[in-house]
Amino acid sequence: MIDIILKYFPEITELQKQQFAALYDLYKTANEKVNVISRKDIDQLYERHILHSLAIAKFVQFIPHTKVLDLGTGGGFPGIPLAIMFPEVNFTLCDSISKKIVVSESVSEALELPNTDFVVGRVENLKEQFEFVISRAVAPMDQLYRWTQSYIDETSRNSKINGYLLLKGGDLKEETKAIKRMNRKLFVDEYPLKDWFDEEFFETKKLIYIYRY
Protein backbone atom coordinates (compact mmCIF):
# COMPACT_ATOMS: atom_id res chain seq x y z
CA MET A 1 0.00 0.00 0.00
CA ILE A 2 2.88 2.37 0.51
CA ASP A 3 3.80 2.25 -3.19
CA ILE A 4 2.21 5.65 -3.68
CA ILE A 5 4.48 7.10 -0.98
CA LEU A 6 7.57 5.49 -2.53
CA LYS A 7 6.54 6.86 -5.92
CA TYR A 8 7.11 10.41 -4.68
CA PHE A 9 9.52 9.85 -1.79
CA PRO A 10 11.80 6.98 -2.89
CA GLU A 11 14.57 8.15 -0.56
CA ILE A 12 12.82 7.24 2.72
CA THR A 13 14.59 4.86 5.09
CA GLU A 14 13.61 1.28 5.94
CA LEU A 15 12.29 2.45 9.32
CA GLN A 16 10.13 5.08 7.63
CA LYS A 17 8.80 2.46 5.20
CA GLN A 18 7.83 0.26 8.14
CA GLN A 19 6.16 3.16 9.93
CA PHE A 20 4.17 4.24 6.88
CA ALA A 21 3.19 0.61 6.20
CA ALA A 22 1.88 0.26 9.77
CA LEU A 23 -0.50 3.23 9.44
CA TYR A 24 -3.26 1.38 7.59
CA ASP A 25 -3.91 -1.22 10.30
CA LEU A 26 -3.52 1.36 13.07
CA TYR A 27 -6.07 3.72 11.55
CA LYS A 28 -8.45 0.96 10.45
CA THR A 29 -8.57 -0.35 14.01
CA ALA A 30 -8.86 3.10 15.58
CA ASN A 31 -11.55 4.16 13.11
CA GLU A 32 -13.83 1.36 14.27
CA LYS A 33 -13.98 3.07 17.69
CA VAL A 34 -13.62 6.76 16.79
CA ASN A 35 -14.54 7.97 13.33
CA VAL A 36 -11.52 10.13 12.47
CA ILE A 37 -11.53 9.21 8.78
CA SER A 38 -14.60 8.90 6.56
CA ARG A 39 -15.58 5.21 6.32
CA LYS A 40 -15.45 5.38 2.52
CA ASP A 41 -12.01 6.97 2.68
CA ILE A 42 -10.20 4.39 4.80
CA ASP A 43 -9.17 2.39 1.73
CA GLN A 44 -7.83 5.62 0.23
CA LEU A 45 -5.80 6.39 3.35
CA TYR A 46 -2.43 6.55 1.63
CA GLU A 47 -3.53 8.83 -1.19
CA ARG A 48 -6.09 11.10 0.45
CA HIS A 49 -4.60 11.47 3.90
CA ILE A 50 -0.95 10.41 4.09
CA LEU A 51 0.31 11.61 0.70
CA HIS A 52 -1.89 14.69 0.98
CA SER A 53 -0.17 15.51 4.29
CA LEU A 54 3.24 14.96 2.73
CA ALA A 55 2.64 17.70 0.17
CA ILE A 56 4.21 19.96 2.80
CA ALA A 57 7.42 17.90 2.50
CA LYS A 58 7.46 18.64 -1.23
CA PHE A 59 7.47 22.34 -0.43
CA VAL A 60 9.96 22.57 2.43
CA GLN A 61 12.51 20.30 4.08
CA PHE A 62 12.37 21.30 7.73
CA ILE A 63 15.75 21.49 9.44
CA PRO A 64 16.28 19.56 12.70
CA HIS A 65 14.63 20.97 15.82
CA THR A 66 12.11 23.07 13.88
CA LYS A 67 8.96 23.51 15.97
CA VAL A 68 5.71 22.90 14.10
CA LEU A 69 2.12 23.24 15.37
CA ASP A 70 -0.51 21.04 13.70
CA LEU A 71 -3.75 22.90 14.39
CA GLY A 72 -6.98 20.89 14.35
CA THR A 73 -5.07 17.69 13.73
CA GLY A 74 -8.10 15.39 14.07
CA GLY A 75 -6.71 11.86 13.80
CA GLY A 76 -3.19 13.13 13.20
CA PHE A 77 -3.09 14.76 9.78
CA PRO A 78 -0.88 16.25 8.56
CA GLY A 79 1.20 15.91 11.74
CA ILE A 80 1.76 12.14 12.00
CA PRO A 81 2.95 11.55 8.39
CA LEU A 82 5.23 14.58 8.65
CA ALA A 83 6.60 13.39 12.01
CA ILE A 84 7.57 10.14 10.27
CA MET A 85 9.15 12.06 7.38
CA PHE A 86 11.04 14.47 9.65
CA PRO A 87 12.11 12.50 12.75
CA GLU A 88 14.27 15.35 14.09
CA VAL A 89 11.53 17.98 13.86
CA ASN A 90 9.23 18.67 16.83
CA PHE A 91 5.50 18.45 16.12
CA THR A 92 2.76 19.57 18.52
CA LEU A 93 -0.62 18.17 17.50
CA CYS A 94 -3.57 20.16 18.83
CA ASP A 95 -7.30 19.49 18.65
CA SER A 96 -10.27 20.54 20.76
CA ILE A 97 -11.85 17.05 20.56
CA SER A 98 -10.15 14.79 23.09
CA LYS A 99 -11.15 11.46 21.52
CA LYS A 100 -9.42 12.46 18.28
CA ILE A 101 -6.23 13.36 20.13
CA VAL A 102 -6.42 9.96 21.85
CA VAL A 103 -6.31 8.34 18.39
CA SER A 104 -3.37 10.51 17.27
CA GLU A 105 -1.49 9.76 20.46
CA SER A 106 -2.11 6.01 20.22
CA VAL A 107 -0.84 5.94 16.61
CA SER A 108 2.27 7.90 17.61
CA GLU A 109 2.95 5.56 20.52
CA ALA A 110 2.52 2.46 18.34
CA LEU A 111 5.04 3.89 15.87
CA GLU A 112 7.37 4.96 18.71
CA LEU A 113 7.60 8.50 17.36
CA PRO A 114 9.77 10.51 19.78
CA ASN A 115 9.07 13.88 18.14
CA THR A 116 5.36 14.39 18.81
CA ASP A 117 3.41 15.85 21.69
CA PHE A 118 -0.30 16.41 22.01
CA VAL A 119 -2.57 19.16 23.29
CA VAL A 120 -6.30 18.83 23.91
CA GLY A 121 -8.12 22.13 23.95
CA ARG A 122 -8.25 25.51 22.32
CA VAL A 123 -5.14 26.80 20.60
CA GLU A 124 -5.45 30.08 22.52
CA ASN A 125 -4.25 28.24 25.63
CA LEU A 126 -0.81 27.38 24.22
CA LYS A 127 2.17 29.07 25.86
CA GLU A 128 4.95 28.56 23.30
CA GLN A 129 6.02 29.67 19.86
CA PHE A 130 6.46 27.76 16.62
CA GLU A 131 8.21 28.32 13.34
CA PHE A 132 5.31 26.95 11.32
CA VAL A 133 1.61 26.36 11.82
CA ILE A 134 0.25 23.59 9.61
CA SER A 135 -3.38 22.64 9.11
CA ARG A 136 -5.70 20.75 6.79
CA ALA A 137 -8.95 22.56 5.93
CA VAL A 138 -9.76 23.39 9.57
CA ALA A 139 -10.95 27.00 9.25
CA PRO A 140 -10.74 30.03 6.95
CA MET A 141 -7.27 31.59 6.72
CA ASP A 142 -8.21 34.78 8.55
CA GLN A 143 -9.57 32.81 11.51
CA LEU A 144 -6.43 30.67 11.72
CA TYR A 145 -4.31 33.79 11.59
CA ARG A 146 -6.38 35.52 14.29
CA TRP A 147 -6.06 32.51 16.58
CA THR A 148 -2.35 31.90 16.16
CA GLN A 149 -0.48 34.96 14.88
CA SER A 150 1.16 35.49 18.28
CA TYR A 151 2.56 31.94 18.21
CA ILE A 152 4.73 32.42 15.12
CA ASP A 153 8.39 32.79 16.09
CA GLU A 154 9.96 35.82 14.41
CA THR A 155 13.36 34.17 13.94
CA SER A 156 13.45 32.13 10.72
CA ARG A 157 16.03 29.32 10.34
CA ASN A 158 14.54 27.24 7.53
CA SER A 159 14.75 27.81 3.77
CA LYS A 160 11.23 29.29 3.98
CA ILE A 161 10.23 32.22 6.17
CA ASN A 162 8.27 31.19 9.27
CA GLY A 163 4.52 31.18 8.72
CA TYR A 164 1.55 29.01 7.76
CA LEU A 165 1.40 25.91 5.57
CA LEU A 166 -2.26 25.10 4.92
CA LEU A 167 -3.71 22.27 2.85
CA LYS A 168 -6.89 23.48 1.20
CA GLY A 169 -9.07 23.04 -1.88
CA GLY A 170 -11.44 24.97 -4.10
CA ASP A 171 -11.66 28.67 -4.86
CA LEU A 172 -9.77 30.63 -2.19
CA LYS A 173 -10.05 34.17 -3.59
CA GLU A 174 -12.38 35.42 -0.82
CA GLU A 175 -10.31 33.82 1.94
CA THR A 176 -7.17 35.38 0.50
CA LYS A 177 -8.80 38.83 0.35
CA ALA A 178 -10.04 38.48 3.95
CA ILE A 179 -6.64 37.65 5.41
CA LYS A 180 -4.91 40.40 3.43
CA ARG A 181 -7.43 42.88 4.79
CA MET A 182 -6.39 41.85 8.29
CA ASN A 183 -2.70 42.49 7.63
CA ARG A 184 -1.46 44.09 4.42
CA LYS A 185 2.10 42.92 5.15
CA LEU A 186 1.11 39.28 4.65
CA PHE A 187 2.03 37.36 1.50
CA VAL A 188 -0.26 34.50 0.45
CA ASP A 189 1.29 32.09 -2.07
CA GLU A 190 -0.73 29.28 -3.65
CA TYR A 191 0.79 26.02 -4.92
CA PRO A 192 -1.38 23.50 -6.84
CA LEU A 193 -0.70 19.97 -5.63
CA LYS A 194 -1.27 18.65 -9.17
CA ASP A 195 2.19 20.07 -9.94
CA TRP A 196 3.67 17.52 -7.51
CA PHE A 197 1.24 14.57 -7.60
CA ASP A 198 -0.37 12.88 -10.63
CA GLU A 199 -3.47 11.42 -8.98
CA GLU A 200 -6.87 12.92 -9.85
CA PHE A 201 -7.63 13.57 -6.19
CA PHE A 202 -5.06 16.38 -6.15
CA GLU A 203 -6.47 18.21 -9.17
CA THR A 204 -8.18 20.87 -7.03
CA LYS A 205 -5.98 20.66 -3.92
CA LYS A 206 -3.56 23.41 -2.94
CA LEU A 207 -0.85 24.27 -0.48
CA ILE A 208 -1.21 27.80 0.86
CA TYR A 209 1.91 29.45 2.26
CA ILE A 210 1.30 32.58 4.34
CA TYR A 211 4.24 34.60 5.59
CA ARG A 212 5.31 38.13 6.42
CA TYR A 213 8.49 39.97 5.50
Image: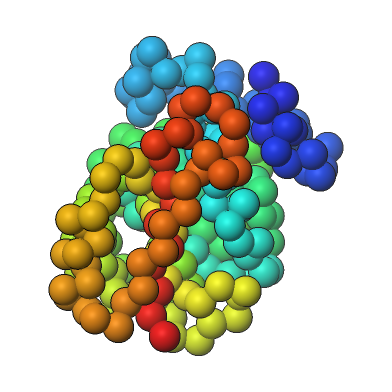
Where is residue 171 shown, x and y percent of the image?
Answer: 26, 45
Where is residue 119 shown, x and y percent of the image?
Answer: 36, 55
**Figure quadrant of the C terminus:** bottom left
- Where on the picture, by quarter, is residue 33? top left
**At x 19% / y 64%, what residue is drawn?**
177
Q: Judge from the rendering whether residue 63 lies leftward or rightward of residue 164; answer left or right.
A: right
Q: Can residue 134 be seen in this view?
A: no
Q: Nearer the viewer, residue 49 or 23?
A: 49
Where is residue 197 shown, x and y percent of the image?
Answer: 59, 37
Q: Judge from the rendering whether residue 93 lies leftward or rightward of residue 17; answer left or right.
A: left
**At x 72% / y 24%, what residue is drawn?**
3
Q: Is residue 39 visible?
A: yes
**At x 67% / y 69%, what residue is drawn?**
63
Say above or below: 40 vs 79.
above
Q: Which of 114 and 146 is in front in this view?
A: 146
Q: Judge from the rendering whether residue 80 lies leftward or rightward of residue 167; answer left or right.
A: right
